[in-house]
Each structure stands twice: as C-alpha cells, then as structure tokens.
Image (cartoon, rainbow, N blue to C red):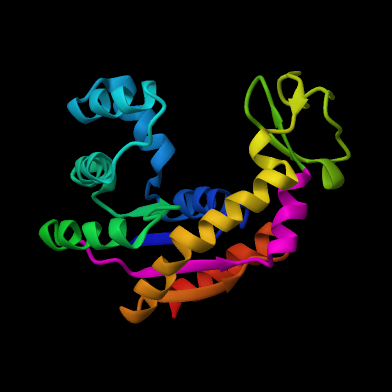
Amino acid sequence: MNIILFGAPGVGKGTQAKILSHIYHIPHISTGDILREAIKEQTPLGIKAKQFMDRGNLVPDDVMIGMIKDILQTDRCKNGFIFDGFPRTVEQAQSLHPIFKELHIHVKKVINIEVDEKEIVDRLGQRLVCKGCGKIYNSEMDHFNIGDKCFKCGGELYQRNDDRAETVKKRLQVYRKETEPVKKYYEDLGLLHNVNGVGEIEEITQRLFTALKD
C-alpha cells in the first residue's frame, strides 16, 4: 500500500503516519528522516545535500527527489510506504510521477488531513518537546509547562520556535502559497480524499481507515 499524507503544518500528519506505519507494516517516510539518513550514511546525494545545508541553503528539488528515488528502490519499501508532508510543491509532485511510473508504483490514496487554521495555531502553541528524548507533550491535555521535566527521561520541556503563534502563522502563509496547490494537482488526478483532522487521535485514525478502504 502506497499512501501520501498531505495537509498544513500541525494537522497531525506525523502522528497518523506512525500509527499507519505500525498497522500496515510499511515505512513512514518524511523528508527530514531521508535527509538525516542520507547524510549519516554519506551517500553521494547525502554529501551533496549537506553541502547545501552547511551553506544555509535549502536542498534543491532534484537532490531531494533523487534521495527519495533511492529509498523507494530499497527492500524497505517493497511492500509500500507512507509519505509524510511530501511533495511540498506542484513541481515536486510532477517530478515524482515519472519515478512512480518507472518503478511501477501505484499510489492508492493522497489523504488530505483538514484542520481549521485557528485550531492549528492553538494546537501547536500547546506543544512542548523534551530536550532529552524528543517526546512531545500537550501543555493543556498533559498539564505540563515550559521547564517541567519529561515523564519519560527527565529532560527539560521547551517550546520550539516553530511552534510560536507568530511563526506558525508565517508557516501557514507559506503553506497556502507553495503547498496548497498540490492538493488541486492530486484532486485533478482523482487521488485526493479529504479527512477531518479534528478530534481524538483514535477517531482520526479511524477516519483514515475508512478513507483507505473506500
């Protein structure tokens, strides 16, 4: 099963991708993970990507697409995959198409997780991260504050700059301009399925199951 999870920052793509990955026994693939792995393994594309990152530049699409093609050809993806937050632009989506064709990959569904922007700002504003193990907490639901200790490892909890309200609003502006057109691209291909991303994690997972079974 090959799935693309799509949606604005903070809609819960990563959380749901991990759940689906465990249930369907297929890898959860995010661009961040791909970059870190390629750089760690010092692959030719990983070395190239690190050169751009060390200069403070974004990794070009052709390098990113190349790394994705490499990972799609490994045994890790032989039974399918879940893309989390990729492609981010129409150009990236168009570049993926010939690769899927070449590798005989059929994408079952592109799932667009929908959450109101106010909800996203509130949700991310409540997110705290452990400096030690990276565990994520919700300040309101878990009753933790900045500076508290992680229940798992005892590390200090903090709020990432990316999760501050002003930054989140800017991220959403970038999303609307650069990434939201991808939704129309997959809609025109008849692959897009919208899923309500508001509610308990288990409720949203059940909606995803329903969308994937349709």
Residue 7 shows in the view: no
Question: Does residue 53 sit above or below 101 in this rendering?
Answer: above
Quarter containing the N terminus: bottom left
User: Quadrant location of residue 137?
Assistant: top right
Horizontal arrangement in the rendering, residue 10 relative to residue 75 (left or right): right
122 part of magenta stretch = yes
In the picture as drawn, the residue positioned furthest to the left comes out as: 102
* Region of the chain picked out in magenta, as a range: 105-126
Residue occupying image coordinates x 72% and y 25%: 152
Q: Position of residue 39 (x, y in %)?
A: 32, 24
Horizontal arrangement in the rendering, residue 183 relative to residue 11 (left or right): left
Question: Does residue 156 sit above or below 84 in this rendering?
Answer: above
> How many numbered badges does the structure rendering display?
0
Q: Position of residue 211 (x, y in %)?
A: 49, 75
Residue occupying image coordinates x 30% and y 78%: 189
Residue 157 shows in the view: yes
Residue occupying image coordinates x 25% and y 46%: 65
Horizontal arrangement in the rendering, residue 15 relative to residue 117 (left or right): left
71 part of magenta stretch = no
Residue occupying image coordinates x 81% and y 22%: 149
Q: Position of residue 70 (x, y in %)?
A: 20, 40
Quarter containing the C terminus: bottom left
Question: Does residue 121 sit above or below 130 in this rendering?
Answer: below
Q: Position of residue 9 (x, y in %)?
A: 58, 53
User: Quadrant location of residue 99?
Assistant: bottom left
Camera-side residue of 117 and 114: 117
